[in-house]
Each structure stands twice: as C-alpha cells, then as structure tokens.
Amino acid sequence: MATNPMQRKARNSFLLGMLLMLVITGLIIAFLAMMLMQTNQKLAASEQSMVNVYVLNTNVKSGDVITNDMYELMSINSAVVPSNATSTSELFSDYALQDKDGNQIVTKTEEDRETGEIVNKNYITIDNREYEVFKDEAHPENRYIVRDGENEYLDLVSVPLIAKVDMNANTVLTLELLEKGDNTVQDDVRRQEYNVVVLPIDLATGDYVDIRLMLPNGQDFIVVSKKEVEIPMVGDTDSETTMWVDLSEDEILHMSCAIVDAARVVGAKLYATKYTDPGMQKAATPTYVVNSDTSALLTNNPNILESAMTELSNRYTAGNSANLRNEYIQPAVDGQGEQGQSNLETQMQDSITRSQEERVDYLEGLTSAAPVTTTSGSTTSGSTTTNTAQ
C-alpha cells in the first residue's frame, strides 16, 4: 500500500529517533560498565592494601594501665598505618615480661637467618650478657635461654603496661606509646588507708602522687613516690580527707615514721603532689630517712623482700643520706620536747576519730543505696518490710 510523503517522513523520523536512543543507551551502559570496572579495581586494590592492626577501643589518659580488653584488631589502610604497628597481641604481652630480678624482656625486629623473613625476637640481659629467649614447643608459656649449652628456664612475671600519653579510641597501638609500669604487685604489697595526708584540691581516683614531708625550716623530703591513688566514696561523694594506696612493707614503715614526725613537729606538713604526665614521668627517688627505731625494724623485718632490702641499703649508704636524719629531721623533732608528744597523741586520736566517722558514713551509704524487695513486690531503701498474710 502506497504511503504519502508525510507518513514516510514520520516513519523515518521515528526510526532515526529509536536508533539515536539505542546509541545513547549503549554509550551510557558502556560508561557505567567502565566506571563499575574502575570501582571494582579500586576496591580490590584497597582490600589488598588493608592490614589488621591493634587499635584502642576506648579513650585512655597518660598513666592509665592498658589491659587486654582495651584494644582490638581492626582493618586499616596500610598507607596510614605506622610501620611499627602489629597484629600480634603477643608483642604486648612479651613486652610486659621480666624475671624476678627485674631483668626485662626486650623485643627486637630483625631478619631471620634461615628464612630471611622479618620477625620479632625476644632477648634478656643477665649479668651483663644478652641471651635470646626461646619458647618451649610443648609449653609455649614457658621461656628459656641457652647458657653454657644448657636450657635454662626463666621465672618470669608480667608488669603493667602504662600509656605514655593521652590517646583516643581508634589510635593504632604501638610499643612506643607504652611504658612498663614500676608498680609490680609483689607479695608484701598491701592496700593502705590514710587520712592524715594533705590532698590536692583536684585529686581523683587514678592519679599518681608522691607523698612528701615538709618541715618548718623549709626542708622537703619524698617519703614514697609515684603511687596510684583511689579516693573512696563516703555516702554519695568522694572522701575529702581519705585516700587508698598500695604500698610495700618498707613503704608502709616509711609512711608510719613520716606520719609520726609530721605529728610531732608543729608546722610540718605531710602532703601529696600529683604527676602531671605520669605515663612519661619516671618515679622520683625517695629522700626521706626514717628514725633509728624504724631503721632497726626495717633491717630485721622478715616481711621485706630481699630486693627491697638491697635498694634500701643502697639508698642510705649513698652520699650523705646517713646524715640527713641527724642534721635536718631529728633536730626538728627533738626541738618540740614534751609538746611534740602531746601533738602526736592529739593528731593520732583525731585520725582515728576521722576514720571511725567516715567508716560509719560509708556503711550508711551502702545501706541506703541497697534496694530491698518486699514480699508484696514493692521496693524500699534502707529498711526491710515483710507483709504477712493474715
């Protein structure tokens, strides 16, 4: 059937439009396919560049103890990961190891002679000689060195790992950000409570302090150094006067002697000073010298560890430490005469009274905070109610 020119022109226009639409659609599909291919290539390259490293899962402050639950494995682009990051948690646990004599395990990154791979190896220095530390294949938790051709097993302990600086969650954790703590819990460590120490206004649980004795003549002595404090709750608030610290036997005796000296001397002050950056700052060296009675007790006390006894001996035989007591502290104490004994008795009684009063407040706070469920299903605070069916 013949068609007129107008119909033919309309049909040709339609076919041309369809052809153009198919060409444009093909171009769009080809462009999208190319973009998808490039995206997949980038994703594949990105996945290949991802590495698993340990990162913090919480914010920490300088001086905080880093525990296993505070870090976890996370996949991060290798381009932003420090070269000293690790995906092996053993690196941290090995770093915390030392033997009973305080000789520390040191981890070194080096090339394995047999395989040529880069590996971490542990070493320990004993009697000025470095030994490689090996794991027992049957019992990997046991470590040994080879000395004179014989396997010698090590008696190792773990010390706390301390954050050197403030760090936020998701910070990649490396050994350079950690410091070995010096507050190893030993057999003679006990938690002590003190309410005769002047505390800084902003002191809070977790802070580290030196406890110092200042005399009226301006002399200032460090009694114990770098101790983490805990402020107990009395009722609903922190105690204003009491703190808890963990001390070894010799430190307890030093504190007791310093408390007596501070109580005897009018104008003396036993006070705490905070570390501003405990993760980076080393513990100060104690300078306070005890009296002759306490010194004799220290020498003959069977509860003091041998390592602590050696440290005490070295401290008091070095320089003029032996004369510090006689030249500065003892004259201030003796100068108080009978008044000093009266001061001591008064302050000791005040300390006992404060402890008793805070203990009562503490127990009352526990009682009022504990909910008691009655048999009728109601809850009361600080009292017990029993409903008996008649």
Image (spheres, rainbow, N blue to C red):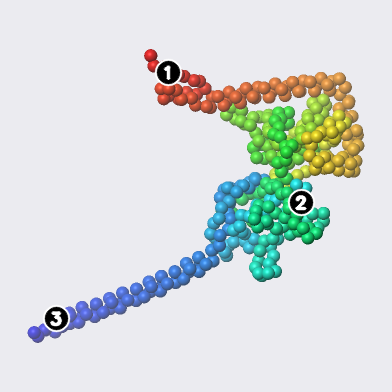
Q: Nearer the viewer, mark 2 or mark 3?
A: 2
Rendering quarter of residue 375: top left
Residue type at mark 3 is: Gln
The image shows residue 314, relative to residue 121, as above or below, that is: above
Q: Secondary structure at mark 3?
A: helix
Circle 1 residue: 387
Sequence-first disc among 2 and 1: 2
Q: Nearer the viewer, mark 3 or mark 1?
A: 1
Q: Nearer the viewer, residue 294 or 288?
A: 294
Sequence-first disc among 3 and 1: 3
Residue type at mark 1 is: Asn
Position of residue 346 in the picture relative to residue 158 (left or right): right
Circle 2 residue: 103
Residue 369 coordinates in the image, percent (x, y) = 53, 27
Q: Residue at x 67, y 22 (%)?
A: 356
Q: Quadrant where the C terminus lies?
A: top left
Residue 294 coordinates in the image, percent (x, y) = 84, 31
Q: Secondary structure at mark 1?
A: loop
Residue 316 coordinates in the image, percent (x, y) = 87, 40
Residue 161 appearing in the image: yes
Residue type at mark 2 is: Asn
The image shows residue 131, relative to residue 383, as above or below, that is: below
Whether label 2 touches label 3, CB < 8 Å: no
Q: Secondary structure at mark 2?
A: loop
- The tag on residue 295 is none
Circle 3 residue: 7
How many marks are shown on the rendered structure?
3
Q: Residue at x 46, y 71 (%)?
A: 41
- The Cα–Cα distance between marks 3 and 1, rounded to whole angstroms, is 100 Å
Q: Residue at x 78, y 48 (%)?
A: 101
Rendering quarter of residue 65: top right
